[in-house]
Amino acid sequence: MNEALTLEALIEQIQSGDHNVRAAARDNAGQVGAPAIAPLAEIAADPDPGKFEIARSANRAMQNIVYHAGRPGAADEARAVSAELIQLVGAEPPLQFRRDVMWMIWQIAGAEAVEPVAALLGNPDLRDDARMCLEGLPAAEAVAALRAGLAAAPDDFKPAVAHSLRKRGVDVPDVPDLRLVPTKQTSVTPVGR
């Protein structure tokens, strides 16, 4: 690795008009760690279409920080990065950015992320992303949140939540597994009938 990248240098370089400078900053962002998450998030959530490539570089830099902090033996770094990402869940950045943040969270967070993510199960635009995030979180609290989400879910969302619970090893007999229900007219009798 080259010389240590500072937070100030990362933020400056990630906003460069030179894609090579941005790429180098993005690729080395992991070493900067948790302090870079909030400033990078501000750049990544910029809706200006003229800054799309810069926003995308900032998003990828955040992902690289997640990968770096998630390495074996870096539990303190992982907790710090997770805490920063959780702060972004309740904010109102662009929809796709919120989805990306949840994707990053399930890769690095634990029980501390369950409550803010579970709160999004009622959001029609983010409920599937929240469900998938909870499905991937390695915490018993995530299973409990999915159970509560199933009880509160509208009928059209229940099969998806039930699927996530099944993936976590929970039997959900009251909700049909949509993979076993024919999607078009057939003479084949569905399993279990």
Image: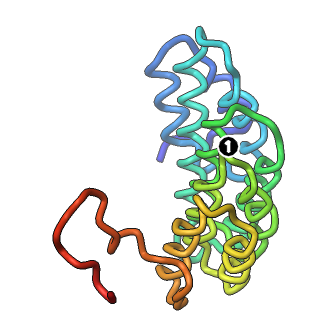
| Residue 78 located left or right of residue 1 | right
Viewer-side residue, 128 vs 14: 128
Vertical position of residue 9 compared to residue 149: above or below: above
Q: Residue furthest left?
A: 187
The residue lying at 52 percent from left, 20 percent from top is 53
Could you tell me residue 68's position as x and y percent?
A: 55, 58
Q: Which residue is mark 1?
A: 98
Dot 1, crowdedness within 10 Å: few (<14), some or many (≥20)?
Answer: many
Could you tell me residue 96's position as x and y percent?
A: 60, 36
| Residue 19 located left or right of residue 30 | left
The residue lying at 52 percent from left, 25 percent from top is 22
Q: What count of labels does the image hold? A: 1
Colour basis: rainbow
What amino acid type is highlighted by mark number 1? Arg
The C terminus lies in quadrant: bottom left
Could you tell me residue 26's position as x and y percent?
A: 53, 36
Vertical position of residue 150 compared to residue 37: above or below: below
Quarter of the image where one finds residue 137? bottom right
Viewer-side residue, 35 vs 45: 45
Viewer-side residue, 81 vs 87: 87
Quarter of the image where one finds residue 12? top right
| Residue 1 located left or right of residue 55 | left
Q: For the residue labelled by badge 1, is the local secondary structure a helix, a strand or a loop?
A: helix
The residue lying at 74 percent from left, 61 percent from top is 117
Viewer-side residue, 20 vs 132: 132
Could you tell me residue 1's position as x and y percent?
A: 47, 47
Vertical position of residue 146 compared to residue 108: above or below: below
The residue lying at 70 percent from left, 31 percent from top is 94
